[in-house]
Amino acid sequence: MDSGNELEQRNRHFDALASRSGLMWLGQNTNHFEPCPAVRQAMIDCIDAGECHRYAPPLGVEELRGAILEDLGLDQDFSVMVTDGAIEGLYHACHTLLGQDDEFIVTDPGWLWPRRFAASRKARVVELPIYDRDAGFRLKPSQLREAMTERTRLIYLVDPNNPMGSIQTAVEIEEIASIARDAGAFLIHDCTYRDFAEGHTLAARHYPQGTITTYSFSKWLGLAGLRLGAVVASPETIDLLAAAPPNNLGSSFLAQRAALAGLRHKAEWFPGVQDRQRANQTSIKQMIDDLEGPETTVFPSHGNFLAIDTCKAGIAPASLCAFYLERDILIRHGGYHSIRCGGRFVKVSTTVPSEWINAFCSQFEEAIEWSRSAPVVQTLY
């Protein structure tokens, strides 16, 4: 099958999922809790005011840019470029900063798309394995130091890690930032899941001139479908990225008004989201602990998801996903995150109604038994 046909098949697959009534979305780390009322009202007000007819400022609404810096605890020495989702900022950074034969360092498992962005620029992708329970499923600074060469141009660190749910310590972040600074390399610190973490440390504080922080509204605020994010970096780096951005006419006014309302009410609204998703994690953990074989990786996870190792259970993660999909439950297999160790785990989203988690847990033993004798699953995305 050629790549064009495969792409069409993949799109039809997700279109069918999006149209599937009653599907329980436990596979994309999206937030399915009810939205903050102020966010809903902000979108209505934006439509009523006719703002959707206009282009937004190219770097984003000024009040939102300031609110993002405030949320991160960074000062005006940094600059913000609002993007059409955090992934657009990541894509743009890779395409702007990487060239042929440059080296791009990532963790494995991690997120496959940055590797593809780098490969499209003909950069060399260097994967550092972190699927190691003894190491806490996180990057060791010594690994990074050993991997650095004179060709290292860009380091990509998703922290908290997707899909493991691990978080780098403050000491590790400081050392990672130091390694990047000493090499004159850029460090992309993907902080998509920082709001679900305990004790998260920003690399930007240790390496302000070369750190690019990616910021997302998809997970904590539940705006995945509105596609809004940001990159935060030094003014000089933002100038470099803003020279030819994909969204030079600005990101959606509707999404920006929703995001701004979310930040204004974050302190009163988000703690309830965190409490509910942590309770969901606990329900899954208790269910897993009562069984022989499957194991959680990092608990509590510092993201809005939980990874479950299936190796000792003797089952293929893709088979487990296929079982649940037949029962209107979408979970993700590790192959989406890693070629090397994707056959070892599944990932379950936890910013979802508790009824969805109960449905997942109540069928897990049956899913294991079914998966042990199930035929090999050929295609799952």
Image (cartoon, grey):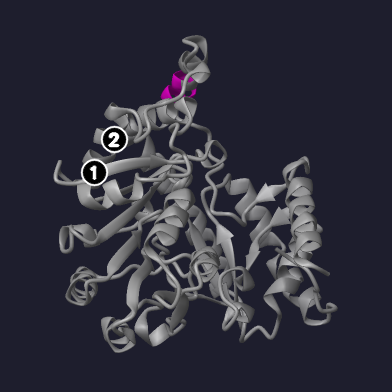
Q: Determine crowd level at label 1: few under 14, some 14-19, many 20+ residues with C-alpha closer than 10 A.
A: many
Could you tell whether 21 is left or right of 117 in the image? right
Percent position of residue 159, x then y: 36, 64
Q: Could you tell me the amino acid type at mark 1?
A: Ser
Quarter of the picture holding the C terminus: bottom right
Q: Is residue 234 visible?
A: no
Q: Which tag, 1 or 2, sits closer to the chain's start?
A: 2
Residue highlighted by disc 1? 79
Residue at 35% from the left image edge and 45% from the top image edge = 243
Q: Is residue 195 above or below residue 365?
A: above
- SS for dot 2: helix
Magenta-tinted stretch: 37-42
Image quadrant where residue 107 sits: bottom left
Q: Residue at x 56, y 47 (%)?
A: 352
Q: Nearer the viewer, residue 153 or 72?
A: 153
Tag 1 near tag 2, CB within 8 Å: yes
